[in-house]
């Protein structure tokens, strides 16, 4: 059996490893010119942790884990309103949680690819003939390819989804926020952070800062916006949205890189009635983006790739495997998406009252008798994402 995977991000690479292990001949197509580096910082936990253990990459991922003392929510002047102990968060996740850059997950999955997996950069699908027993592809450069299965793992703006299922407007649910991230260097900002992850979260705006290493600070932003259209100049939009704030915002914005080095996108979720059609299936953000506000996007991408390999192993029925993948994971994904929408108004306060209630709740969870609530608050459980022996 041959599978073609569109996208060499976390979902695509995890799927390539899992399908290869299940006996498939795998080719990965990636429109970028090469492996992407950096990306924003994320907390890696949940179903992806178990999947990474199963795929044999958890030790490599943990080698990139950053040290975080605590997470502070601050106001526009830098005054701390609430705190979360990172050690307590890790305990709530049974030790299975660590901070890592998204690009470092991709690198380790890339390095773990079996030698017989073909990976082609600067390659993009232009047309799909999606049949009941296989697919025929035409690439942007005119080449043709055939396979028994096409996996769309090409993100929230998936080209595969557009070609096979329809336009974005049918599936992408805009949540009303834009997000951005970049790396900067600033001794003044580093001193203010003092090795903690600080989040300036006030009405309709959030900015997070963390010192990744001695020379780099990661900054990410979330801004409430009515329009889904992304600005032509992301830095100008960030300055307009955050330039009136104090604390270290002036230094953070002044040290921003050129526009091409700023990640900028909208926050949205992908909602579909079914993630497969004939011999094309979607995985990761292309199928079920949960959004930055829900967390676990990288984790669900990795877990989804592993799960697809579990149901398509051996000489099993491909159609039955795809149906099992969809029907079993869908309720779990819908729950994560619902949690993300519910959390949005608290992490990017819809009003000053939301910020006050959030601070009270987080500070209360630092009290030992209530610390057990933290696991439920952040949905640390990985239950249900393994499809082995089902």
Image (spheres, rainbow, N blue to C red):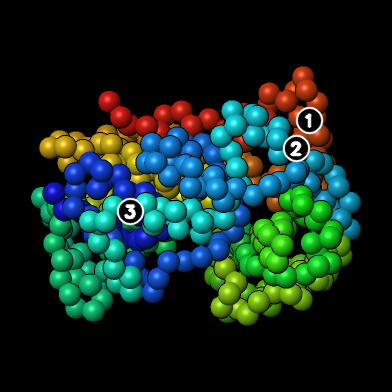
Identify the residue position indicated by label 2 in the image.
85
The local secondary structure at tag 2 comes to: strand
Disc sitting over residue 351 in the figure: none
In the image, residue 222 lies at what x, y percent?
66, 59
User: Mark 3–mark 1 contact, CB under 8 Å?
Assistant: no
Residue occupying image coordinates x 62% and y 65%: 180
211 shown above or below 388:
below
For the residues marked 3 and 1, what is the alpha-carbon distance in whole angstroms?
41 Å
Identify the residue position indicated by label 3 in the image.
113
Image position of 324 (left or right of 8): left
Is residue 27 something that shows in the picture? Answer: yes
Residue occupying image coordinates x 75% and y 39%: 84
For the residues marked 1 and 2, what is the alpha-carbon distance in whole angstroms?
7 Å
Is residue 354 something that shows in the picture? Answer: no
1 or 2: tag closer to the N-terminus: 2
Few, some or many residues within 10 Å of mark 3 (<14, 14–19, 20+): some
**Total tally of numbered discs in the picture:** 3
Identify the residue position indicated by label 1 in the image.
366
User: Mark 1–mark 2 contact, CB under 8 Å?
Assistant: yes
Which numbered mark, 1 or 2, is in the foreground of this view?
2
Image position of 49 (left or right of 189): left
In terms of depth relative to the viewer, which is nearer, 27 or 349?
A: 27
Which numbered mark, 3 or 2, is in the foreground of this view?
3
In terms of depth relative to the viewer, which is nearer, 110 or 172?
A: 110
Which numbered mark, 3 or 1, is in the foreground of this view?
3
């Amino acid at each position: 059996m041959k599978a073609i995977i569109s996208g060499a991000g976390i979902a695509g690479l995890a799927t390539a490893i899992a399908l290869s292990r299940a006996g498939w001949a795998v080719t990965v197509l990636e429109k970028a010119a090469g492996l992407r580096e950096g990306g924003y910082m994320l907390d890696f936990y949940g179903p992806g942790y178990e999947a990474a253990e199963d795929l044999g990459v958890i030790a490599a991922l943990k080698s990139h884990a950053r040290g975080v003392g605590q997470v502070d929510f601050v106001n526009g002047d830098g005054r701390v309103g609430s705190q979360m102990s990172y050690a307590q968060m890790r305990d709530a996740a049974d030790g299975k949680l660590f901070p890592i850059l998204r690009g470092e997950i991709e690198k380790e999955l890339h390095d773990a690819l079996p030698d017989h997996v073909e990976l082609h950069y600067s390659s993009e699908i232009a047309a799909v003939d999606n049949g009941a027993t296989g697919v025929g592809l035409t690439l942007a450069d005119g080449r043709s390819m055939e396979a028994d299965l096409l996996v769309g793992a090409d993100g929230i703006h998936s080209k595969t989804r557009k070609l096979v299922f329809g336009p974005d407007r049918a599936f992408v649910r805009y949540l009303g926020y834009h997000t951005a991230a970049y790396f900067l260097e600033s001794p003044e900002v580093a001193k203010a952070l003092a090795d903690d992850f600080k989040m300036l979260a006030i009405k309709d705006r959030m900015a997070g800062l963390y010192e990744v290493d001695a020379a780099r600070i990661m900054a990410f932003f979330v801004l409430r916006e009515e329009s889904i259209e992304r600005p032509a100049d992301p830095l100008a939009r960030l300055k307009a949205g955050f330039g009136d704030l104090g604390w270290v915002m002036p230094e953070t914005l002044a040290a921003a890189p050129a526009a091409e080095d700023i990640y900028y996108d909208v926050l949205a979720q992908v909602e579909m009635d079914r993630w497969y059609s004939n011999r094309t299936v979607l995985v990761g953000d292309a199928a079920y983006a949960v959004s930055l506000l829900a967390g676990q996007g990288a984790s669900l991408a990795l877990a989804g790739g592993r799960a697809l390999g579990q149901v398509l192993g051996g000489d099993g029925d491909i159609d039955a495997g795809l149906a099992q993948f969809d029907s079993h994971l869908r309720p779990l994904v819908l729950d994560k998406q619902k949690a993300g929408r519910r959390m949005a108004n608290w992490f990017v306060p819809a009003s000053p009252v939301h910020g006050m209630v959030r601070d009270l709740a987080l500070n209360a969870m630092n009290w030992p008798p209530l610390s057990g609530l933290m696991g439920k608050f952040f949905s640390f459980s990985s239950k249900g994402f393994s499809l082995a022996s089902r």
